[in-house]
Image: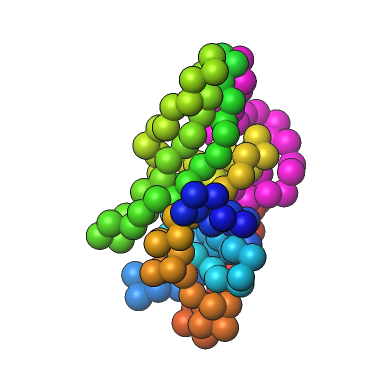
Amino acid sequence: MMESGNVRVNVHGVYLVKTPYGQSPVVILADSRGRLLPVFIGLAEAASIQVALSKVKPERPGTHDLMVNVLSESSVKVEKVVVVDIRDGIYIGRLHIKVNGTEKIIDARPSDCIAIALRVDAPIFVKEEVMGRYSVTEEYFSKFYSNLENLELG
């Protein structure tokens, strides 16, 4: 689904991949055409995304749970999140919120945007230019990252 140059995606999964530098967490975003966008993230963010995907309510709120609670208590609605660019290997995200009827766009790491979006059921988008340039097929991803492991918590 397109929305003014953005492609709607879902979280295909959170994995640990072996790289020349060691293991690295990656969240995979997938569009309806089967394109995958690997987004390399930190371990804490990967765990937070995995918790949100599992729908398990943690005993105590984590950082992203806290942010969602603050937004909710402040009557701020998360409209959507968008991965807008990748510059020098750094992913750039935007958190679109509505405050008192006014739309605001906040610069944020895509990993934080995704963790928040999953908690509030907000749609996740990627700019078509980013998806077109940086996405891979599942076959390519599986071959390139042959040592793919699901991120396991606990």
Q: Residue at x 34, y 70 (%)?
A: 21
Q: Is residue 131 visible?
A: yes
- Which of the two residues, 71 or 64, is positioned nearer the viewer here? 71
Find the magenta span and give its range: 49-73
Which residue reaches farthest left?
88
Query: Quarter of the image containing the N terminus?
Result: bottom right
Q: Is residue 131 magenta?
A: no
Secondary structure mostly taken by the magenta-highlighted segment of the chain: helix
Q: Is residue 58 magenta?
A: yes
Q: Position of residue 137 (x, y in %)?
A: 54, 78
Q: Residue at x 40, y 50 (%)?
A: 84
Q: Position of residue 72 (x, y in %)?
A: 61, 20
Q: Residue at x 67, y 39 (%)?
A: 121
Name which quarter of the figure residue 41 lies in. Answer: bottom left
Q: Is residue 25 visible?
A: no
Q: Residue at x 44, y 27 (%)?
A: 104
Q: Position of residue 153 (x, y in %)?
A: 64, 53
Tally of numbered discs: 0
Q: Is residue 37 above or below residue 46?
A: below
